[in-house]
Amino acid sequence: RAPITVGPDGEVRSCSLSSTSVGNLLREPWDVLAARLWQRHILPPRREIAQSCRGCRHWPRCQGGCRLSAQAVFGGFSHPDPLAAATK
């Protein structure tokens, strides 16, 4: 599961926090955009699991929380979501 955001202009982003578009749904087919989204924005952050999340009982549901929030606050995807980190 992965949230996505499609703006009123057709721009597709990995989530509402992201300012980076992977393309425009009005100009490109969904399968092309979905593949680009997965390869560039969804898969790379999922490869970097925060050390504090390893073995956590909440992992199946949480999966480290919001990767963009982690990057914004801690400077990288290998950290947990700041809200997830605050609840431990």
Image (cartoon, helix red, strand yellow):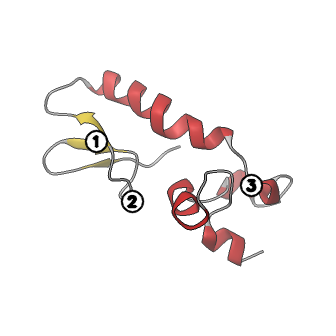
Indicate which disc, 3 or 2, sits on the residue closer to the N terminus. Answer: 2
What is the tally of numbered marks visible in this picture?
Answer: 3
Residue at the bottom extreme? 86
Local crowd size for mark 3, using a 10 Å CA cut-off: few (<14), some (14–19), many (≥20): few
Q: Is residue 28 placed above or below 7 in the rendered structure? A: above
Residue identifier under label 2: 17
Alpha carbons under labels 3 and 2: distance apart:
22 Å
Nearer to us of marks 3 and 2 is 2
Residue identifier under label 1: 12
Q: Position of residue 35 (x, y in %)?
A: 41, 25
Please give left or right for residue 60 compared with residue 17 in the image.
right
Alpha carbons under labels 3 and 1: distance apart:
27 Å
- Amino acid on which the number 1 mark rests in the picture: Val
Local crowd size for mark 1, using a 10 Å CA cut-off: few (<14), some (14–19), many (≥20): many
Q: Position of residue 55 (x, y in %)?
A: 86, 53
Indicate which disc, 1 or 2, sits on the residue closer to the N terminus. Answer: 1
Please give left or right for residue 48 compared with residue 18 in the image.
right
Indicate which disc, 3 or 1, sits on the residue closer to the N terminus. Answer: 1
Please give left or right for residue 61 compared with residue 88 in the image.
left
- Amino acid on which the number 3 mark rests in the picture: Trp
Residue identifier under label 3: 59
Q: Is residue 30 placed above or below 9 in the rendered structure? A: above
Q: Residue at x 62, y 73 (%)?
A: 83
